[in-house]
Amino acid sequence: MIINGVTIDATFAEAFPMKATRAIITAHNEKWALIAAQAMTGFATSVIACGCEAGIDRILDASETPDGRPGVAVMIFAMGGKGLAKQLETRAGQCVLTSPTSALFAGIDSDIKIPLGKNLRYFGDGFQIAKVINGKRYWRIPVMDGEFLTEATTGQVSAIGGGNFLVLAQSQEQALTACEAAIEEMNKVAGVIMPFPGGVVRSGSKVGSKYTTLNASTNDAFCPTLKGMTKTELSPEIESVMEIVIDGLTKEDIDKAMRVGIQAVCDLGSANGIKRISAGNYGGKLGPFHFHLQEIMA
């Protein structure tokens, strides 16, 4: 398959089951809602070392939030429910409770509930007040700028992590430009996050390492500087490879994000140094969800 001179490899991205939640942060204005959201989703690029993968879902208008203020929806993904609950509670307490004018609400409904502000109430040292509105429990916690309002719980849902595609280009600048174009379009898709910095990862990994203490190491087959030293997947003209990783609430969400992202890259075309689109997989052994590039782009 070739789109605008860009070859779409006959391969697939391999993804795996995760647990996810969604929360809504509001504040006095969009600036402070974003500050709290960026803090809450920081250091959350990969479960390999961060404990979770997190990112901003989208910015919300005041008409879309529970308290009628500007807001930001964030999503957090983890390998299991216990780890997800721990990461959510820690990040809510350290990053949202502390942020001026913030409030915190459930962003997704589910039969499985996990603590959002349920345990943060103890920070109120006995001065906290519970309110039940329309069957939902909220906590009002006194803080120095007034009070912190938080919903007690939010939902936990099954999700998918590890959708991905690789952009192979003739130069670093061309690969980055293509990835930036892809991320701009993918950010318009609901229900997905691209957890790496700016949505892009340049240090793609493979499972395992020559060092027994590491469970992941550099994807040498796609490293341009190693073309003469390893079993490479790169042709001579490829000098830069960048990866976009996608976590989503459903397979359909990831399909859509990959489709619009790859199309944005192909729109730049081979004339702008983009030569191939590929994907990372481990022979189908890592995860049960397979995103076949040519099927997605058909």
Image: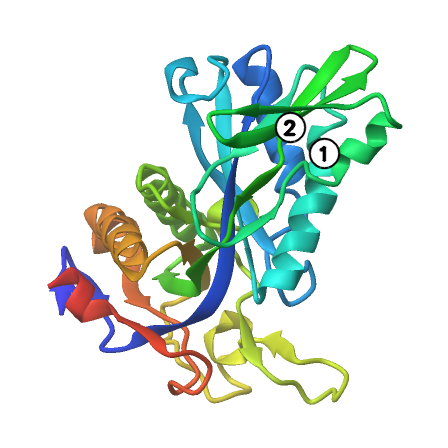
* First of labels 2, 1 by sequence position: 2
From the top left corner, tell me how far across and down residue 110 is, in percent.
43, 49
Q: Residue sitting at 59 percent across and 62 percent down? A: 81
Q: How many marks?
A: 2
Q: Is residue 214 left or right of residue 135?
A: right
Q: Residue at x 49, y 71 (%)?
A: 224
Q: Residue 90 lies in what quarter of the image?
A: top right
Image quadrant assignment for residue 252: bottom left
> Up-down: is 80 above or below 14?
above
Query: Which quarter of the figure is the N terminus placed in?
Result: bottom left
- Residues marked 2 and 1 touching at CB (< 8 Å): yes
Query: Mark 1 highlights which residue?
Result: 95
Task: Say whether residue 157 is left or right of residue 296.
Answer: right
Q: Which residue type does callout 2 highlight?
A: Ala
Q: Say above or below: 62 vs 81.
A: above
How many residues crowd mark 1 within 10 Å: few (<14), some (14–19), many (20+)?
some
Residue 101 visible in rendering: yes
Q: Residue at x 25, y 46 (%)?
A: 264
Is residue 212 shown left or right of residue 9? Answer: right
Residue shown at 46% from the left, 25% from the top: 134
Residue 220: percent from left, percent from top: 54, 79
Q: Secondary structure at mark 1?
A: helix
Taking depth in this image into account, of 72 and 151 the one nearest to the observer is 151
Q: Position of residue 179 (x, y in %)?
A: 39, 48
Q: Residue furthest left?
A: 298
**Label 1 is placed on what type of residue?**
Cys
The residue that label 2 is drawn on is 36
Q: For the C terminus, which image quadrant?
A: bottom left
Secondary structure of the residue carrying tag 2 is helix
Vertical relation: 84 (above or below) 99: below
Answer with the quarter of the image where residue 259 lies.
bottom left
Q: Which percent across, then down, holds residue 216?
A: 63, 77
